[in-house]
Amino acid sequence: MQQDSAGFAVSTMLAHAERPRVDAASRGLCQPVHRDSLDDVLSDVRAHRAQAVLFSVARYGVLPTARIATLVREFPQVPAIALLSHDDPAAPHAALSLGHIGVRTLVDVRQPDGWNRLRGILMAERSGDVERDALARLNVDLAGAPRDCWHFFELLFCTAPRILTVRQMSIQLRVLPSTLLSRFFRAKLPPPKRFLSLARLIRAAKLFENPGFSVAAVANHLEYSSPQSFGRHVRNVMRMSPVEFRHRFNAHVMMEHFRAELVLPHLDVLRRFHPVEAEPGWARSAANFRPSYAPAARVADGARTRAPSD
């Protein structure tokens, strides 16, 4: 499945006549991926290739209801949307049945403003992405921070390319890894690796909000080498098992932990921190600036003061 540049894909089960109109309505917002079987939709969701699902009310009669109920129950953070596009005597019953099994959003596109409503829903879901939420919070915390400092935080939460190591971060910032580490150390900030580790666990906490995601599925999606590697990472960083982490942290709580440990105690430094663009030494503090001619002037004045007594 190819996702759009925003990284937001919607897996659909639609009538063939509905597909072109959904494509047109979602253009610029997301990438609809049209499926012919519910197994494919479930596969998209379980592999985290789809951030929402769209069902046609017209196809309800041929869809396995129990499987839809399972999807909605196991993946509550993946929005399930029902689309009503045709007048059909069975449509009211189908819509009620979908609502009964947990599909809470019904979009009636039989009127022109229905397509605008669908766009609004897709836009809201796209903007709810964990990376965007994180950057929105940090944008307030780091108001006025230098451009290169903000770019560092953007890279922590970007979706493409996904930054996993300090070396990858350095490549994107166009600075040597040793230089990046040195600047954080001199500024008395936590090391870049700590920022990367906790940002990665914010994504893990978001995925764990869906009961249908196993530890192995989360480890695979976040590009750990194995579930065991993911487990070691959680233990080393959070001092707890992945199962305990899942119970104690959702994405919001993990984001607050990130802010409390790495951002809020260091606001004064971060708001003037340059991880890439080095400042001249004299510019770091106005108090360090001494005009080169000042000492000479004082010596000359002293000499003139002593001259009459000679």
Image (spheres, helix red, strand yellow):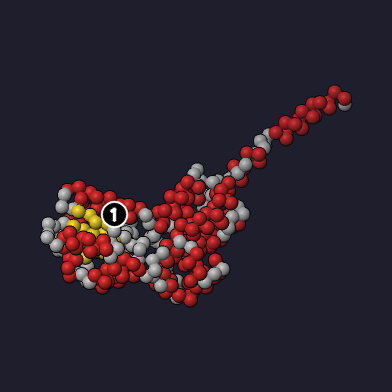
Q: Position of residue 214 (x, y in %)?
A: 41, 72
Q: Which residue occupies 77% across, 28% down?
A: 301
Residue that sits furthest to the top in the current view: 308
Q: Position of residue 52 (x, y in %)?
A: 30, 61
Q: Which residue occupies 31% across, 70% down?
A: 70
Dot 1 alpha-carbon crowd within 10 angstroms: few under 14, some 14 to 19, many 20 or more: many
Q: Position of residue 98 (x, y in %)?
A: 24, 63
In the rendered structure, the answer to whether residue 44 lies left or right of residue 170 reads left
Q: Which residue occupies 22% across, 54% down?
A: 107
In the rendered structure, the answer to whether residue 146 lies left or right of residue 39 reads right
Which image quarter: residue 294?
top right
Q: In the image, is residue 307 above or below residue 201? A: above
Quickly name the residue at label 1.
122
Image quarter (top left, top right, bottom left or bottom right) of the N terminus: bottom left
Specify whether residue 278 is in view: no
In the rendered structure, the answer to whether residue 226 lies left or right of residue 51 reads right
Q: In the image, is residue 230 above or below residue 167? A: below
Q: Position of residue 106 (x, y in %)?
A: 24, 56
Image quarter (top left, top right, bottom left or bottom right) of the C terminus: top right
Residue that sits furthest to the right in the current view: 310
Specify whether residue 118 is in view: yes
Depth check: 65 or 222 in front? 65
- Type of amino acid at the residue the image marks with label 1: Leu
In the rendered structure, the answer to whether residue 121 lies left or right of residue 233 reads left
Q: Which residue occupies 55% across, 54% down?
A: 260
Q: Is label 1 in a helix, a strand or a loop?
A: helix
